[in-house]
Image (cartoon, coloured by chain):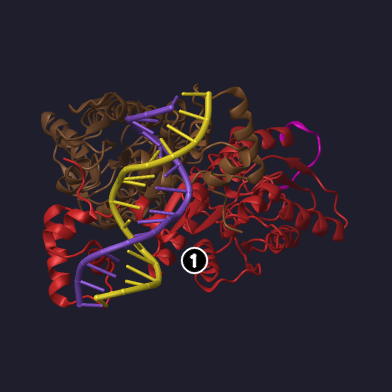
Chain colours: A red, B brown, C yellow, D purple
DNA sequence: CTGAAAGCGCTAACAT
DNA sequence: ATGTTAGCGCTTTCAG
């Protein structure tokens, strides 16, 4: 049996289709009796509105598309939670997709949302070119989270990566470290800013820079750590680009018999639950994920419902979370 | 400027709208000249098909909806990866949503996908009632992954939780453990089967059962471990319902000064990357996530494209991964 | 191979 | 308060 349509409900309730439409959406210009009849008929028939049809007719979906860069990275769920909560408050729904760590899939995900006519898109992290992102932002309201980007076409929500990075360096230098290596996330979101903070602070203190280019993944942390150990440059502390790569570093150091923080101090970024585990106790940087997710949604709602078009950039302040992987050198 | 429609493309290419439709979808009954003209026009206009309209007219979306029970649980991304890969091979797209650990949101996610007219739905884990799930399965092809469920209306893909559980118990008992507590996931997906495997094996060996009801989260592992330590029952090993709760247990044991595995052995379930970290080295059970995700998609495709209606249940075989958190008692 | 015409299921004026 | 009438942008017969 085919799915019941609005006409079926109308017929059963003995009213017109238009009235069913109004009643189902809770309009106040429907007589109580009619409303009851419609609701009852819809219920009996098991009627469910066809969103494709509704969307086509109304030209809006009340849906926000969220693109999670990497499902494996424990950093992102917090943003999704924030977006989910906010979206509920505004009476919108959330649709998600992942970039599966691939710029191609990232663009594909954005385009899919555009084709689906979502009212707004939230992009988290990622490595797609800013040209491609701006191009998409011309077609749909867009908020980019956790990816510093300067554009007049879209809104951004970020923690201050540069500041977070200087917090980390300040901590390590205060502990007495001079030989601090940084594993950069390369072109990944926020990585250049963290790198800049590292370089500026090291330079300001007259320290020699030691940078390995990696990515925001565990395997890249493994590879970078191996390169660091294989080189003959002295290292007493490592600032990994994010928690996930720090975990990879930790494994390598452990396997190599280097004590953390005894021989080498280690710092991550993101303050994920994994780093917080007592067996890890990773010093890291907290960056308000839930709030970032909520902010992105409200920014989008402003564009969608109030027609704002000027770009706004929101920055949240990161904070250092000192745990057990940092200590004075040769401690 | 409004988005270009197919009519705009047709006009620009000097052909009819129907031909544009055919050309854009790669039909072979379009003259090469026309095809070129259409493609060029579409490109110049930056035309993108409106999926809502296409869906409404064709009554299919070539989209599969994937519902991830808990974004914070590192178990699920592997399933999503498998589904993503498989979906690409079949020329479908993936849309995701999360149950955010709430049965209400879980149902809402399913209904949203149905309303969006996706061609199939993959549900992972979760705690929604089987009635509700079966109800939904009447409206759309459905495959339920990692949630044992017996229904003639939908397909299922699972690892053999009962077997996995007996593998764990066999390992612990062989090591010499007699006082083994189990932290069950309660009503969560697969938890009852793991509990049954625990109870049957303990009984078969004449051992006293010791069960704490929890959930598949870290916080529930924390709470359960605290209850276990607070009770005066002897415990030399704990079998947590999944890796996430095992991590919570690990934290509590650590805080209480209990050595793992020196004082207490610990086993998880899911073999997630977090448990594999060298600092954790959690003994766990591997359950082929990528394959489960792929299987779910191909099962759905069978229903969608070949009209299969009989339910099929696929079971993959779990295997024990012994790491550093298990050892003989008083070792 | 191409075009005309008829909807898909719904919303949105516009009447009444 | 309720019904009528047009579409929304696309696919899909059906002619030619």
Residue A160 location, x and y as percent?
67, 64
Image quarter (top left, top right, bottom left or bottom right) of the C terminus of chain B: top left
Residue at horizontal 68%, vertical 44%? A263
Quarter of the image for residue B318 reads: top left
* Quadrant of the rendering where the N terminus of chain B is positioned: bottom right
Residue A322 visible? The answer is yes
Residue B331 is a magenta residue: no
B274 to B3, vertically: above or below: above
Q: In terms of depth relative to the viewer, which is nearer, A170 or B64? A: B64
- Whether residue B267 sits left or right of residue A160 in the image: it is left
Left or right: residue A281 compared with residue B159: right
* Label 1 element class: helix
Residue A146: quarter of image = bottom right
State the image coordinates of residue A162 (x, y, percent, origin top left).
72, 60
Does residue B286 sit above or below B60 in this rendering?
A: above
Residue occupying the point 61% across, 40% down: B42
Where is residue B197 shown, x and y percent of the image? 18, 33
- Residue occupying the far right of the picture: A206
Q: Which residue is mark 1?
A: A294
Magenta-tinted stretch: A229-238
**Predominant SS of the magenta segment:** loop
Query: Which sits in the foreground, B15 or A258?
Result: B15
Q: Residue at x 11, y 29 (%)?
A: B204
Task: Answer whether residue A278 is visible to the viewer in this image.
Answer: no
Mark 1: few/some/many CA within 10 Å (<14, 14-19, 20+):
many
Q: Horizontally, is B104 left or right of A87 in the view?
A: left
Residue A75 rendering spot, x and y as whole percentages: 52, 52
């Amino acid at each position: 049996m085919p799915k019941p349509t609005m006409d079926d409900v109308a017929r059963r309730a003995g009213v017109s289709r238009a009235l069913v439409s109004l009643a189902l959406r809770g309009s106040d210009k429907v007589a109580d009796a009619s409303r009851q009849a419609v609701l009852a008929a819809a219920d009996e028939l098991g009627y469910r509105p066809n969103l494709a049809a509704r969307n086509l007719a109304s030209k809006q979906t009340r849906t926000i598309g969220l693109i999670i860069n990497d499902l494996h990275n424990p950093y992102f769920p917090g943003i999704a939670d924030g977006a989910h909560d906010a979206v509920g408050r505004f009476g919108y729904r959330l649709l998600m997709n992942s970039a599966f760590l691939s710029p191609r899939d990232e663009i594909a995900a954005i385009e899919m949302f555009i084709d689906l006519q979502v009212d707004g898109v939230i992009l988290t992290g990622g490595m797609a070119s800013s040209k491609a992102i701006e191009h998409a932002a011309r077609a749909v309201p867009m908020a980019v989270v956790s990816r510093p980007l300067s554009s007049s076409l879209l809104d951004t929500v970020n923690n201050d990566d540069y500041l977070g990075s200087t917090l980390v360096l300040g901590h390590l230098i205060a502990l007495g470290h001079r030989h601090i290596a940084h594993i950069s996330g390369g072109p990944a979101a926020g990585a250049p800013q963290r790198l800049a903070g590292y370089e500026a602070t090291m330079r300001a203190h007259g320290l020699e820079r030691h940078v390995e280019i990696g990515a925001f993944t565990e395997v890249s942390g493994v590879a970078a750590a191996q390169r660091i150990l294989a080189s003959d440059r002295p290292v007493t502390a490592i600032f990994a680009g994010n928690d996930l790569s720090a975990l990879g570093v930790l494994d390598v150091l452990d396997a190599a018999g280097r004590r953390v923080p005894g021989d080498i101090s280690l710092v991550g970024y993101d303050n994920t639950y994994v780093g917080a585990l007592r067996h890890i106790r990773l010093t890291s940087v907290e960056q308000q994920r839930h709030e970032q997710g909520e902010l992105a949604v409200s920014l989008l709602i402003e564009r969608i419902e109030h027609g704002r078009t000027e770009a706004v950039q929101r920055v949240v302040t990161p904070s250092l979370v000192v745990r057990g992987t940092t200590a004075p050198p040769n401690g």
